[in-house]
């Protein structure tokens, strides 16, 4: 039996500001999903939250991009939005960009990460969910999980992993994707995915048999809404063990925090801090960016879990280091590279300011020469 694992997420209102979700909203979303499970439309479901974002985790047999499943998520977010509006939560319904569902939730605002596979005798997988960042935040850890043997010993010692993995990389501006096979094309891959503003990893496949290993939400709302609204806090699903990286190899990249984009007003860089479910409530300068890891085992499509993978003191040092990195970046204030370059900012007043100052700009070289001539005349007198 082919099983589909779908995670669909949205920010439908922040409590308070962009920090957290409201329990009443989360309960409402959960109720809609559970009713659908009771009706037999889903095998199982679960809700995760990270910061002001809600993720709906669903197992079913309808396949990816399925209208029934996407409609369930859309309806749940719409119902949740009604409550968020009643409570006047911040940015109520912010990720629902249209009033009407049109068969597929992609392009309508929410982020989607889905994969279809034959459930293995044991099927551990991890859902990563981050707030105050963007889908390209997964580029670095996906490289380490699936292409760096210094992170993932299995690439060397597991026969099913030894042929490497193929990364499907999306150019978020053109909408075109390219598949790159590692280790052979590793440097080509890194040349692309190091450019986090342009390229994001969409899927990872095992070369041994083409099996799907990981999938990420790659929605970048800036391109959908025609302007940089960019509320695209991402999710990712990674399969673990026996032919895939071990759970610990999948989590290991997060032990060494790196810098991602999306902090404060979606317009700053900051360290991605791995936290427990409990601590996914970013508030310092609306951050720093957070990531949770929810571990599940599947049993005939039933979700056994989640277990809170970053609730481990072994990640304490990463949390402290992330705070040190946050201090270093905060020192920069409004200056780059803490603040993103103008073209990557979620919103900016720069064009307006430039418009206002239009006509006041002058050629500094010309003016110097003119002044020089004036001086020479004065000297002659
Ligand atoms: P255990 O010996 O605890 O089962 O761990 C096996 C393993 O390979 C962990 O990476
Ligand atoms: P979210 O993307 O989590 O809504 O945060 C937006 C923001 O501007 C925070 O400062
Ligand atoms: Mg928000
Ligand atoms: Mg958010
Ligand atoms: Mg955001």
Image (cartoon, rainbow, N blue to C red):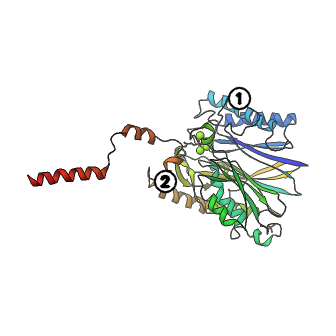
Q: Residue at x 32, y 41 (%)?
A: 360
Q: Residue at x 61, y 35 (%)?
A: 94
Instruction: Tell me the residue at 48%/58% (across/down).
Output: 328
Residue at image mark 1 = 100
Mark 2 close to ligand 2, CB under 8 Å:
no
Q: Is residue 108 above or below residue 340?
A: above
Q: Circle 2 — which element?
A: loop
Distance from the alpha carbon under mark 2 to that under mark 1: 38 Å
Residue 338: mark in rendering: 2
Where residue 253 sits, quadrant-wise, is: bottom right
- Badge 1 local density, few (<14 within 10 Å), some, or many (20+)? few
Does 248 sit above or below residue 51? below
> Residue 136: percent from the left, percent from the top?
63, 53
Please state the horizontal and vertical placement of residue 83, each as a whole percent of the image. 66, 29
Q: Is residue 377 above or below residue 102?
A: below
Along the line of sight, which residue is nearer the eye, 306 or 144?
A: 144
Query: Is residue 126 found left or right of 317 in the rendered image?
Result: right
Query: Along the line of sight, which residue is nearer the eye, 350 or 175?
Result: 175
Disc 2, disc 1: CB below 8 Å? no
Q: Is residue 292 left or right of residue 270?
A: right
């Amino acid at each position: 039996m082919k099983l589909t694992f779908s995670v669909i997420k949205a920010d439908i209102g922040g409590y308070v500001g962009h920090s957290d979700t409201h329990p009443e909203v989360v309960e409402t979303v959960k109720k809609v999903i559970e009713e659908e499970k009771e009706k037999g439309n889903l095998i199982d479901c679960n809700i995760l939250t990270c910061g002001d974002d809600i993720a709906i985790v669903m197992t079913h047999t309808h396949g990816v991009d399925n209208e029934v499943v996407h409609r369930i998520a859309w309806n749940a977010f719409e119902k949740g939005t009604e409550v968020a509006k009643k409570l006047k939560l911040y940015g109520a319904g912010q990720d629902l960009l249209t009033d009407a569902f049109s068969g597929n939730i992609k392009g309508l605002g929410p982020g989607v990460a889905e994969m279809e596979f034959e459930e293995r005798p044991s099927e551990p997988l991890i859902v990563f969910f981050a707030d105050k960042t963007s889908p390209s935040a997964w580029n670095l850890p996906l490289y380490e999980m699936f292409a760096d043997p210094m992170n993932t010993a299995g690439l060397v010692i597991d026969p099913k992993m030894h042929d490497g993995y193929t990364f499907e990389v999306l150019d978020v501006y053109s909408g075109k994707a390219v598949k790159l096979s590692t280790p052979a094309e590793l440097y080509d891959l890194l040349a692309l995915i190091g450019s986090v503003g342009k390229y994001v990893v969409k899927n990872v496949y095992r070369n041994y048999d083409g099996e799907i290993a990981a999938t990420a939400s790659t929605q970048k709302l800036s391109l959908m809404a025609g302007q940089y609204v960019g509320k695209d806090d991402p999710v990712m699903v990674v399969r673990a063990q026996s032919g895939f990286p071990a759970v610990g190899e999948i989590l290991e990249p997060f032990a060494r925090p790196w810098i991602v984009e999306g902090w404060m007003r979606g317009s700053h860089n900051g360290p991605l801090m791995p936290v427990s479910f409990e601590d996914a409530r970013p508030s310092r300068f609306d951050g720093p960016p957070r990531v949770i890891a929810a571990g599940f085992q599947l049993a005939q499509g039933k979700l056994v879990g989640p277990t809170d993978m970053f609730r481990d003191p072994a990640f304490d040092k990463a949390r402290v280091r992330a705070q040190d990195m946050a201090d270093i970046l905060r020192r920069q204030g409004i200056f780059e590279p803490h603040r993103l370059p103008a073209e990557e900012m979620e919103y900016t007043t720069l064009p307006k300011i430039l418009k206002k100052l239009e006509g006041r700009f002058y050629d500094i070289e010309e003016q110097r020469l003119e002044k020089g001539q004036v001086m020479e005349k004065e000297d002659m007198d």
